Image (tube, rainbow, N blue to C red):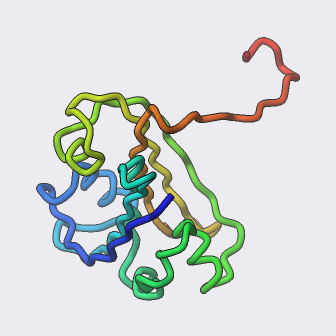
Amino acid sequence: MYIQPTLKRVLIKKKDSKIAKALRLFFGLSNQDDIHRVRRLCLREKTPVSYSENYMPGGLARRISLQDILPKSSITKILNEKMKLSDLQGEMHLEAIPADPDIARILQCQTFSPILHTQVFSRFSSGEPLQVHNGYLKAEYYKYIVAIEMKDFDKI
């Protein structure tokens, strides 16, 4: 598998991002505040299988170079190696969604094809935002497995 990364500084406005409202709320931004985005496309035998976007404040993004993201490392792992992160908190949302025209173009699939969308909001233990990660995964290439403890049978 090959990951094709891009590192791009973007200005978040309502029209620039599908999650602009969520980003503004999470980071406490106005429509004109500066934010950075790292985008990566994962290819399997030259076929796109997943696409990810990581949004973070400029100070954090400037610590990451294009060479850092060339290997198959997560952005959080790269930031940890550079900053010695500890005690991070997060919330992950996972849902099956139809591919919109932009994501379908990137993943080279049909509009409305089923894809898995993951969205992770990461914070420092102080509550300060670290990053927002959006992952778009072609359903035919991924299976999501969760380990569970079989103690409370009423919840299963």
Q: Tell me the residue at 76%/35% (across/down).
A: 147
Examine the image and state in which quarter residue 10 appears.
bottom left
Q: Tell me the residue at 42%/50% (across/down).
A: 135
Q: Relative to the observer, which residue lies in front, 34 or 50?
A: 50
**Quadrant housing the C terminus:** top right
Residue 38 placement, left or right of 101? right
x, y (%) of residue 94?
A: 49, 37
Q: Relative to the observer, which residue lies in front, 71 or 22?
A: 71
x, y (%) of residue 8?
A: 28, 76
Q: Residue furthest front?
A: 45
Q: Relative to the observer, which residue lies in front, 45 or 59?
A: 45
Q: Tell me the residue at 25%/51% (across/down).
A: 106
x, y (%) of residue 1?
A: 51, 58
Examine the image and state in which quarter residue 85 appears.
bottom right
Q: Residue furthest right?
A: 151
Residue 58 placement, left or right of 74? left
Examine the image and state in which quarter residue 73 appears.
bottom right
Residue 154 placement, left or right of 78? right
Would you place residue 132 above or below residue 156 in this image?
Answer: below
Q: Residue furthest top?
A: 154
x, y (%) of residue 15?
A: 11, 56
In the rendered picture of this protein, how many numbered marks are placed on residues?
0
